[in-house]
Structure formats: structure tokens, C-alpha cells
């Protein structure tokens, strides 16, 4: 079974966001603005992306 990967890029700053949003961005592996990571597409990662959808770009 092949695992599907998605690319996530942080587009906005974490200044002024909640601690839950900061934890989700850290859990996704993002470190700074314009940093992108490839992660495995799973329900857990989709839930974290949903919390910070206004701060990330998915491709």
C-alpha cells in the first residue's frame, strides 16, 4: 500500500495565535514562514491542518 504525501507551507506568523495553533504548527514540523514540509496524509494530520488552515498552504 502506497502512502500519499502532501506538502504544507507556512505562510503566516504565529504571533497572536492560540497555544493550540502553535502546537499544531509545531506538530506538523513547520518552523518559520515559507518553511515547507512533506508529510504523510492521515486523519491526524488533516485535523492539525484544519486548525491552522488560515496560516498554511497545502499542495
Image (cartoon, grey):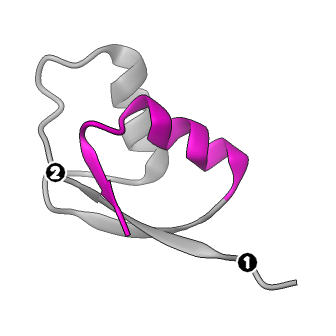
Give the mark nearest the N terminus, 1 or 2.
1
Which numbered tag is attached to residue 40?
none
Where residue 23 sits in the image (x, y, percent)?
Answer: 42, 29
Q: Residue at x 38, y 68 (%)?
A: 37
In the structure shown, which secondary structural element does the residue marked by tag 2 occupy?
loop
Magenta span contains residue 14: no
| Disc 1 from disc 2: Cα separation | 25 Å
- 40 over 50 or under it: above or below: below
Looking at this view, is 38 or 31 the one in front?
Answer: 38
Q: Residue at x 59, y 48 (%)?
A: 45
Q: Which quadrant holds residue 51?
A: top left
In the image, which residues are magenta? 42-59
Which numbered tag is attached to residue 11?
2
Which numbered tag is attached to residue 3?
1
Q: Quadrant of the C terminus?
A: bottom left
Where residue 28 sits in the image (x, y, percent)?
Answer: 46, 49
35 to the left or right of 49: left
Where residue 44 sits in the image (x, y, percent)?
Answer: 67, 43
Q: Residue at x 13, y 17 (%)?
A: 16
Q: Residue at x 63, y 62 (%)?
A: 41
Amino acid at each position: 500500500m502506497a502512502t500519499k504525501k502532501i506538502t504544507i507551507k507556512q505562510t503566516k506568523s504565529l504571533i497572536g495565535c492560540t497555544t493550540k495553533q502553535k502546537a499544531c504548527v509545531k506538530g506538523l514540523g513547520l518552523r518559520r514562514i515559507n518553511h515547507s514540509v512533506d508529510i504523510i496524509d492521515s486523519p491526524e494530520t488533516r485535523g492539525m491542518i484544519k486548525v491552522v488552515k488560515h496560516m498554511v498552504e497545502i499542495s
